[in-house]
Amino acid sequence: MSSLVSLACVKCRQDLPKTTRLLRCPQCQGLLDPRYDYDAIRSVLTWEIARQRPRSIWRWRELLPIEDEHCIVSLGEGDTPLVRSIRVGPTLGLRHLHIMNDGMNPTGSLKDRSMAVVTSKAVEFGYRVIACDSSGNKAASMSAYAARAGLVSLVFCPNTTPPQKLLQIIAYGGRLVIVDTDRDGVARLYSNLMQRRKAEWYDSGVSNPFRYEGKKTYAYEIAEAFAGRAPDWILHPAAGSMSVVKNWKGFGELERLGLVRNKPRLVAVQSQNCAPIVAAYQTDRRTVSSVEHRPTIAGGLSIPNPGDLGDLTLQVIRESGGTAVAVTEDEIRWGMQELWREGIFSEPTGAVTVPALHRLVEEGKIRSGDTVVCIVTGTGFKDLHSVEDQISIPRPIPATQSAIEEVTQRLLE
């Protein structure tokens, strides 16, 4: 099963036992990062072995932190479609653009990769209640996996959460608390609450060291699809953004195991209305500071102060030779429409990579022969209000043959 050996602090490098339930380093409060026995993994995990296993993130179980396979909670997450672009790519002059559609995960977003892992860990540790704060997708995913595991899910969302996500949470049996504040306000209140409840509830929030490991599977799946090579570029929507950090870790693990020889440049994409990572990157800072923010239709990216998660993202962007890009609200809407032309129904947060890609091509940073992957993180069914703002549903016509023929003729002109 897992080859987990310890958890290491990303700041002071202190090693903690793999059985620890601490979320942060007791010495410096740094984030904890799971470490594995790669020599042991090298002898049991190859591309051929992974291909023979059932399709899900658990094909890579040696690189995930669950030790008891009976504790795994799965809904078939991961292995989402990676499709060649036939609209956006040719329009931009890109011959090798692919789109990874994580909206095809069981609950419709990328969060299933991480919630499958953290819920499995809650089961392994023996918790009965699992909790999180969320703008919607994380809470919906956690509620689904908690339902699957027979756990109680307790979620805290801001008043800006789209109703479709709230309905999904409730449908899965999530105990929902809507707080009359924004995403940042909920995070602060939740953090204070968990200080008093951490012995009773398993915190699957931003500091959980096991949760993000599920996002390493982006790297494994993408490298497998490209026959053991990394693409030149991967663009990812960025709130924290541990998806960028764990993508980099995943490719590093594959390189260490001898399964790839190269690593990609990584691009973190944010809304211009809330872009703390971009602001820090553009001013050559090593740490991310809180920014003044305005409402954005990309609600999943509305985190004005990602803290040390943002610091790690900055570090990874620079190590990879990548960059950080902020896009406008109009560009996000345009990105949604471009994905719709590809047949991919994306919510606003998932569509930000498309206008960012357009910008980088215009600036000459991404060239026509580069291999590029844009990750779409959530389905459009998650936020129908943002879709309805851009689409008009036609009125019913009279139920007569002449009316049908007239309208059909007009539509095909």
Image (cartoon, rainbow, N blue to C red):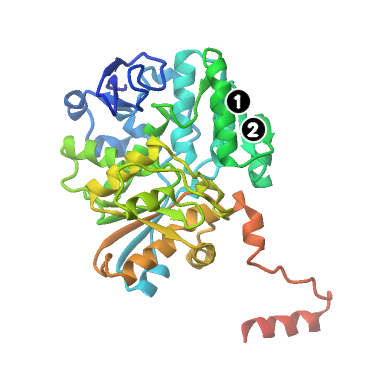
Mark 1 near mark 2, Cβ–Cβ under 8 Å?
A: yes
Residue 397 at what x, y percent from top left? 80, 75
Res 301 seen here: yes
Residue 369 at what x, y percent from top left? 24, 67
Q: Residues within 10 Å of mark 2 (few under 14, many from 20)?
A: some
Q: Residue at x 58, y 22 (%)?
A: 193
**Quarter of image, res 177:** top right
Taking the image as shown, residue 207 lies to the left or right of residue 346, namely left
**Quarter of image, res 113:** top left
Relative to residue 3, is residue 273 depicted above or below? below
Res 217 seen here: no
Residue 370 at what x, y percent from top left? 25, 63
Which residue type carries mark 2?
A: Tyr
Image quarter hosting the N terminus: top left
Residue located beneath label 1 in the image: 153
Q: CA distance from mark 1 to mark 2?
A: 9 Å
Q: Residue at x 79, y 81 (%)?
A: 403
What is the count of numbered marks? Answer: 2
Taking the image as shown, residue 20 lies to the left or right of residue 272, namely left
Which residue type carries mark 1?
A: Ser
